Amino acid sequence: MPLVRIEEITLDIGGRELFASTSLCVNEGEQWTIVGPSGSGKSLLSMAIAGQVPLSRGTIRYEFLSGAEAEDARFGWFPRGTVVRVSPDDHRRLVESEGSYHQARWHASASIGRDTVSSLLTRQSVLGINPFQVLDTPKDPAAFDRHRSLAIETFGLDPLLECPVHQLSHGETKKLVLARAWMKKPRLLILDDPFAGLDVAFRDRLRAALDQLAASGVTLMIVTPRPEELPRCVNRALLVEDHRVSAVVARSELDSRGEESNCTRAQGHGIARPAPRRPTAPADREASGPPTALVRMRDVSVRHGNSLVLSKVSFTVLQGENWAVLGPNGAGKTTLLSLIVADNPQAYSNDVEVFGIRRGTGESIWDLKARMGIASPELHAHMPREIDSLAVVASGFAGTIHSSTAWLPEQAEQAASRLREFVPEAVGRSFGVLSFAEQRLVVIARALVRAPELLILDEPCHGLDARNRAHVIEAVDRAVQTHGTSVLYVTHQADELPTCITHVLELRMGHVVRSGPTQG
């Protein structure tokens, strides 16, 4: 029985006709995925299905709606909770609303009057109910409370309930956004890259939760650059390429295509893993004595309120070392990096040295940032949407996220070259109009715009297809080999680690559980 009928739709975006004359029928009992390369239009199509992008031609019929509800759906207005879409934009909007600047997470004063996890899981918040509304009273308040408790358990939010939202890690914020969508029990749930930024254990947990949700009668549509992560319930796949539907296949055919794919080709659906490569040798250095310590921490502890985020962490990065920083969501990885990149004021109350300079001895944080290349989810979320993508890349020379035109000619050319290398589609376009994956590539180009002494990458391949993941990994290895750059690389994906990695730091609940050279 049909659930959603997509009939000859065409989208008009910036004067371009995209997904021209696309038709599709989503039936009861089917669970879908949308797969395609970065920038292919996967998210745009999912937005259209969720009523978030106007159609220039054609119609989308939601067979579970009738009368005035169906008419309202033409304008993206659905009865509360019937169609829900969760995307990286929802994560970004939540981060922006809870912190006006990307370092706010580390400042205690920014917590005053802010929402907590618990307050965003109330019925009023989850369903978007006007606080002054008196007509819409719950028929069974106890049922919502039970569903809320189940969501808290399913998404592991109980230890975080009293935590201010802006202090959550990227992965913890992702869990909160997913829990809010799950609590709405929609008829159609569209999830855009739901597994990105989540640790291995929680990805397994989320897959199981989605299988249960599908079994309860919810229809899922999962947008992903990594089909290997899909839950078992998914049985249909929509393949997208260059803003058109290239094929509609069964899940079994999608899996076989993934096994046959070669991620080095220029086209494809991004369903292969980057091919293994030989380890990267670092650039030659003069043997002029012992290597310089780029980072040195001694017994560092960081607290947020009553929560101990890092506990007596000692960590040293020598020139020529390249570290993978591993651990589950909330382990303290990003907090550790924030002390190094001069974002966290608690560096001043700890023994932290960067480039041989003790923090709090009068150093300029901009001088420190000018020697680093940095890419992180927080930086991405707070990057101004209105500025030109070239200006974003060029801002890496100064280490700020604000637009400026005061670049030397050679800097402007270098920024343009990096932009063309990573995402040529972004040339001449503002950052905000790019797809999430294209934005992520611009942020990475910014980190690599010059040859930094220290390259700090926090989940850099989040949202990228296999071909672009391979490109980023190769660029990191090349920076090490060509310029002698040292790397700190955070990821939850073992297949995203560059071959240059020489050392591993693993954190759990703020404690070091492993630190030293890689084995083998």
Image (cartoon, rainbow, N blue to C red):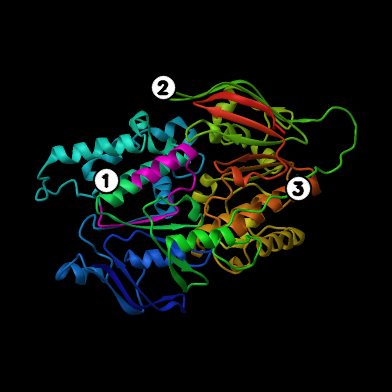
Question: On screen, 80 above or below 204?
Answer: below
Q: Choose between 277 and 71: the one closer to the eye.
A: 277
Provide the residue span drawn in magenta: 186-210
Residue 1 horizontal/vertical position (percent): 23, 67
Left of 52 or right of it: where is 141?
left
The residue under label 1 is 183
Q: Secondary structure at mark 2?
A: loop
Q: Choose between 114 and 36: the one closer to the eye.
A: 36
The residue under label 2 is 306
Q: Is residue 442 visible?
A: no
CB within 8 Å, label 3 to label 1? no
Who's the residue at 47% across and 74% down the image? 244
Who's the residue at 46% across and 75% down the image? 14
Residue 167 horizontal/vertical position (percent): 44, 35
The residue under label 3 is 278
Q: Residues within 10 Å of mark 3 (few under 14, many from 20)?
A: few
Report, in whole angstroms, how far the alpha carbon at label 1 lies from the one at label 2.
Answer: 28 Å
> Which marked residue is nearer to the observer: mark 2 or mark 3?
3
Report, in whole angstroms, how far the alpha carbon at label 3 lies from the one at label 1.
Answer: 46 Å
Residue 400 horizontal/vertical position (percent): 61, 48
